[in-house]
Amino acid sequence: MNSVLHILNGDSTAYSFKDTGLDGDILVWREVLSQGPLIEDISSAAFWEMRSEWICKGLNETPENYRKKVIEPLEKLSNIYDEITLWFEFDLHCQINMLGVMEMMLKHTDLSIPKIYLVCPGECAGVEDFRGMGQLNGSQLAVLYDDRLRLNDWDFTLASQAWKLYVSGDDMALEKWINETNFWGSLHLLKPALLAHLKRVRVNDAGLNHIEQTLLDIYSSGTRAKYAIYEAFWKAEKIYGMGDLEIDIYLRSLADKNLLAMPT
């Protein structure tokens, strides 16, 4: 039997994945590379030490749990598989994690051996408000698997270029690269995610980025309960793929600027 690895975008997908009937090892990617500090060399100890420190400080985690849940599973990337499938969605959260995974694979995986595929849905038949694969059952995930895309050298080159520009923090260089890239290969949902990123790193006349302004508008409209704010933001801006802890980062920023009272 061929050896197979599935790299899943989170625990919610992993929960339903067991009902797909698909064979293989599972690596659950639990990082949130779309938030917090980054350096280019994702394979370095400095990278993961920095991420652990930021996650533990900002998202209420312990270094021990971070190592167990995030770092230790990455050892599977050094194993030899015949086939590897990446499961990442359309939103910025998933697309940046996908870039990180592909950059890690360039460093740690012999890409001449496995066939590498991508499952990257922007929508799902029968799901009216598709926000992510965590909404789906095993049968629906299996259907997505049947439509997966084969990745090639160009896709990895494109991903590496995007990763370096994203990490650099140079939004003008990233915008220029996006505008000059005419072929996106199998990374067909990367461009809209990166454009959403540009909107959140640039500020308006009030000194607020797009996410802050959107949350402030929701709050100012009379929506004051925290979960109601989450729902309104998810409905308006699902391209960001942000969870409640990530939204809280921006709400705290607005509270620190005395633009709202931190919702409860």
Image (spheres, helix red, strand yellow):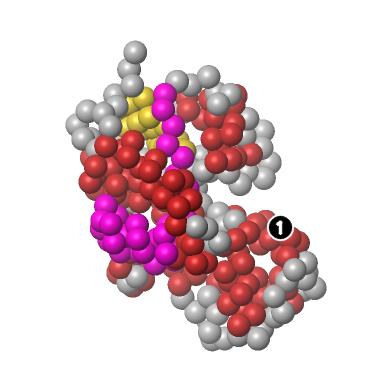
- The residue indicated by pointer 1 is 231
Three-letter amino acid code of the residue under disc 1: Glu
Report x, y in % for residue 42: 29, 55
Q: Quadrant of the N terminus?
A: top left
Is residue 46 one of those drawn in magenta? Answer: yes
In the displayed image of the protein, which residue is found farthest to the front? 64
Q: Which residue is pictured at 67% across the width and 33% down the height?
A: 126
Does residue 31 appear to the left or right of 112 in the view shown?
Answer: right
Between 112 and 203, the residue placed more toward the observer is: 112
Report x, y in % for residue 2: 32, 17
Q: Which residue is pictured at 67% across the width and 45% down the height?
A: 129
Residue range highlighted in magenta: 24-53
Between 26 and 233, the residue placed more toward the observer is: 26
User: Do we see residue 241 in this rendering?
Assistant: yes
Q: Is residue 68 above or below residue 113?
A: below
User: Do we see residue 155 in this rendering?
Assistant: no
Between 199 and 27, the residue placed more toward the observer is: 27
Q: Which residue is pictured at 51% across the width and 30% down the height?
A: 144
Badge 1 marks a residue whose secondary structure is helix
Is residue 17 one of those drawn in magenta? Answer: no
Q: Quadrant of residue 249 in the image?
A: bottom right
Q: Is residue 144 above or below residue 74?
A: above
Report x, y in % for residue 149: 39, 33
Circle 1 residues within 10 Å: few <14, some 14–19, many ≥20: few
Report x, y in % for residue 200: 49, 69
Does residue 100 appear to the left or right of 253 in the view shown?
Answer: left
Q: Quadrant of the C terminus?
A: bottom right
